[in-house]
Image (cartoon, helix red, strand yellow):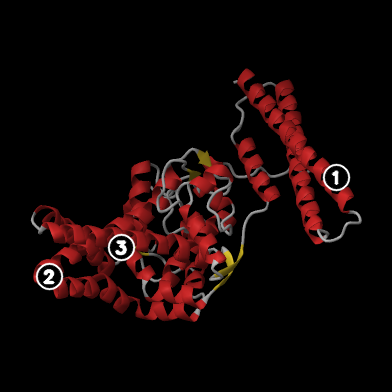
Amino acid sequence: MTTKPQAMTATERDKPIYKTFGELADHGFSLAPGICIFIASVHTSALVLGMWLYTMAPVDWMWAGTLWFIAHFFIGSISTTLYSHRLITHNAVKHVSLPVHLFFNVFAQIFSVQGSVRRWAANHSLHHGVDRHGKKELDPYSATWFPDALRNFLWSHTLTHLYDHPQTEEYQRSHNVKRHPLIMWQDRWYGLLTTFWIFFFPMGVGFALGGFTGLFALAAASMLGTVAVQHNTWTVNSVTHLWGFTDGIKSSASNNYVWLGPLGEGNHHGDHHDFPRDYRNGFGMSGWLLDPTRYAVLLLNALGLVKGLNRASKHEEAEIVALRKLAELGTPGPITREASALRDQLEKTALTLKNEWVEALAHVEKLKKQSKLLQRAEAGRQDLLRDLELAQQAVIKHKEAFYEAVERLRAHGEVYA
């Protein structure tokens, strides 16, 4: 008799693969001098010019710089979360119009200062690929490579961007993906576009309006905006994979319910990793309240600028929630044979009830689709609506039975702990 292989636990999935940063060189990593100089220069400039802006600059230019800083931060953040992330990397909608591609590739996405859309999407695709194939050494900003939280934070938050990563087959395939012609054009001219929008444009506007005082004021604002939007985005790579309230099933990502960085991507990051194609970043009411980018997607859809929203169905959401409930129980310690047999039976019951709940939800969705098709037909519609009401009652019944089974399992574990 063959035994069913055990699924990988979260502990096994997140087991460290390196002990120190020094080991990276032995595995094909090398510091990228150009990127190191650029990031160090921008951070140093932000510090020096920022101190001047808020201690020595004229009041009018201090406020002008502050407004430019806020605008830079917002444009860069929304460009990352809305365009680079949801619309391009994860195809959260079926069609993106040309005006949207133009706006973000020629102008807005440059303010995120995190590489071209094509490069950003390639790296993020590798990050999510680990959830499917489990080769976490390919995740460019993994937060589980090292044995302690500090090193994992430093790596996933900043250090990963300072290194050239090994050219694996998966890396090359991800970076060679052909995307929209405007994305390919932006990738080719990204250096010049960044030089113009981040340096020449604000400095030119500042000099034209206020001489060298205006030049330095808006240069300070641009550097401060660059640093702020970079770290705002990087926290999703680090914080949401290190700390949170509700763990995802497929990855180390967790849900955070009180934080909007950047603009909602971090609040339900576990939900996102469990169903990345969803135009939303989180399930349930807290998903609505803590996901401003969702409103932006809906606005673009209402204006006809994007079409065909992708989202998890109700029964797919239920499957994810149920698996999380079961994962919360963990693995029991040594118990008697009789207790083990009872636990196995309780687990089978819980899994059966979970499947009945999910199947009942799938049946409700099927009936709803049929109801929409028959909205104009009177014959048979009342029977269908009655069936729909009964199916919805069955969903509630199966869900309650599943949660009761989980509690019995939890109580069983506490008795033999």
In the displayed structure, 328 sits above or below 303; it is above
Q: Residue furthest right?
A: 379
Q: Are marks 3 and 1 in contact (CB under 8 Å)?
A: no
Q: Are marks 3 and 2 in contact (CB under 8 Å)?
A: no
Instruction: Determine the secondary structure under disc 3.
Output: helix
In the rendered structure, which disc, 3 or 2, sits on the residue that comes first in sequence?
Answer: 3
Disc 2 from disc 1: Cα separation: 72 Å
Instruction: Determine the secondary structure under disc 1.
Output: helix
Which residue bears the numbered disc 1? 386
Q: Amino acid at mark 3?
A: His
Residue 356 sits in quarter:
top right
How many residues crowd mark 3 within 10 Å: few (<14), some (14–19), many (20+)?
many
Which residue bears the numbered disc 2? 210
Which residue bears the numbered disc 3? 72
Q: Amino acid at mark 1?
A: Arg
Horizontal side of 122 relative to 306 (left or right) equals left
